[in-house]
Image (spheres, rainbow, N blue to C red):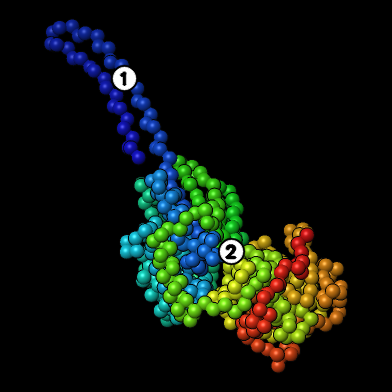
Amino acid sequence: MKPFRPLLAVAALFLAACATAPQPVVTPAPVAQVQPAPAPAARRFKILQVNDVYKIEGLEGGMSGGLSRLRTLRTHLESDGTPLLLLHAGDILYPSVASKYLEAKQMIDVMNLLDGDAVAHDQKLIVTFGNHELENKDDKILLQRLNESRFQWLVTNTLHCPGESCRPFPGTHTSLVVDLQGLRVGLMGLLYPLDRGYARSSEVAASARATVDSLKRAGARVIVAVTHQDMGDDVKLVESIPGIDVVIGGHDHLFMQQRVGNTWVTKADADVKSAIVYDITVPSEGPIRTAPVRVVVDSTIPKDPQVDAAVQRWMAALSEKLGGNTTIGTTRNLLEGVEPAVRGRETALGNLLADVARERMKTDVGVVNGGGIRINDNIPPGPITRYDMEGVFYYANGLVAFEATGQQLLDMLRNSVSRVDAGDGRFLQVSGLRFRYHPANGQFVVNASDVEVGGKPLDLNRRYSIATVDYLYKNGTEDGYELFSDDNRPPKINTQLEADFRTETEAYIRKVGIITTAIEGRITRQ
């Protein structure tokens, strides 16, 4: 930006030649007009947003998403010379099958290549903590991955508390001011409040308010919050804390966007199934001008060869750890396991799992919460492999059974769909019943007349036997299932049939050979 350079006014005054001579009449020279300096030119920069990336290889056999395509997209966006920030809104280290066996080393190694240089420190790749960064109970693994990172970790409200005292995690920043060709952009990274023993996240709004003030004092013209929390909490953050220009959000796993005043809040689809691009114009005064653009990251975007080579090396290392990727059966139909599907509608994979639970436990009904199906990928028609099963059953789970009244079952179904558009893990995949739900007065409704069990209308007074996973039975209140509170939890039945869910599912697939399970209209949205 050129400095203001106003012209100086000049006046020519003539003095008398001598004291005795008559003084001439002096006419001042015309004053030069000061021309206003041109307004400083507007500045531009770009943001490339991703969040909740668990698989370096992408989805659907590498046909969708993946970090090698993210590298290609970044290269393309940087090609016109406009400064770009690559911002990741949390959840990279866990959970994934690869991280489970490789201690998340593969994630850091591949992300170190997103600037094309595995050694140089990437000042423009900035990542915040998600809740799954803190999943491993051993903080030494997290500290090792932070030390290996050749990019910036931005952790504003989460502290490392290995003992009685707390301090910032080593190698992280509590805030950042990045200079983009003279434009100062301030950033903070915010995680919803939690306590994981060695890590504690404080209340978001208080941390954000203090950080916005400090970033402004540091000369930041634009302030970006990189967050990992629910969309509703992001909206409240913008409403309560003035001065935030953009919110780059994670945690929801589904593409979302909402404008709050002049501030955009966005979430990309998990695993780089999509990315979000901002082209931001910053005038000399007043609010920024921008609008987010969702970019679908699929096979039309070529893979970067260098990054893809690293991905393939790590996938080979994973296969070796697993002792080979053996086939346990085949499927005739697509088994959808991506989160928008298993957390939002009936899927063939959900039907298969719920059927296994009901058959093993000899119950009227089987229910499996979508949040417990962790593969976040689709199994296409063809082989079902050990790697697929590792993904589906990332968390070990046992099968249990209990009895509930028809009214209690109805309440479960109502809670199941209460946050269906948010991709919430409470959504139930079902067996032995069919139900319909529909929106009404800003919420989703399931009426008793909308439910059939075993082909018969739901009887609110009858007791039904229900199979599910032990996690839901023990911790269902975390997802709003009050039936599973300590005061209400029904006693188990058929305890002699309890078994490991993965073992039973694999045995079922081997026995059947060819899985023909399909979408059958068990769950209908009207």
Looking at this view, name the residue that lies furthest to the bottom. Answer: 496
Relative image position of residue 230 (x, y in whole percent): 59, 63
Residue at (66% x, 79% y) in the render? 513
Relative image position of residue 455 (x, y in whole percent): 84, 74
Q: Which of 363 and 513 is in front in this view?
A: 513
Residue 124 at least partly seen:
yes
In the displayed structure, does residue 3 sit left or right of residue 220?
left
Give residue 31's mark. 1
Looking at the rendered image, the quarter that the C terminus falls into is bottom right
Choose top left, top right, bottom left or bottom right for residue 379. Answer: bottom right
Q: Nearer the viewer, residue 246 or 334?
A: 334
Residue at (58% x, 48% y) in the render? 261
Residue assigned mark 2: 252
- Residue 263 versus residue 134 in the image, above or below: above
- At label 1, counting other C-alpha atoms closer than 10 Å, the crowd grade (few under 14, some 14-19, many 20 or more) is few
Q: Which amino acid does label 2 sit on?
A: Asp
Q: Which amino acid does label 1 sit on?
A: Val
Disc 1 to disc 2, C-alpha distance:
65 Å
Foreground mark, 1 or 2, reads 2
Looking at this view, name the residue that lies furthest to the top. Answer: 22
Residue 175 at least partly seen:
no
Q: Which of 348 and 487 is in front in this view?
A: 348
Question: In terms of secondary structure, where does tag 2 sit?
Answer: loop
Question: In terms of secondary structure, where does tag 1 sit?
Answer: loop
User: Who comes first in sequence, dot 1 or dot 2?
Assistant: 1
Looking at the rendered image, the quarter that the N terminus falls into is top left
Residue at (70% x, 72% y) in the render? 516
Relative image position of residue 400 (x, y in whole percent): 69, 85
Residue at (34% x, 60% y) in the render? 117
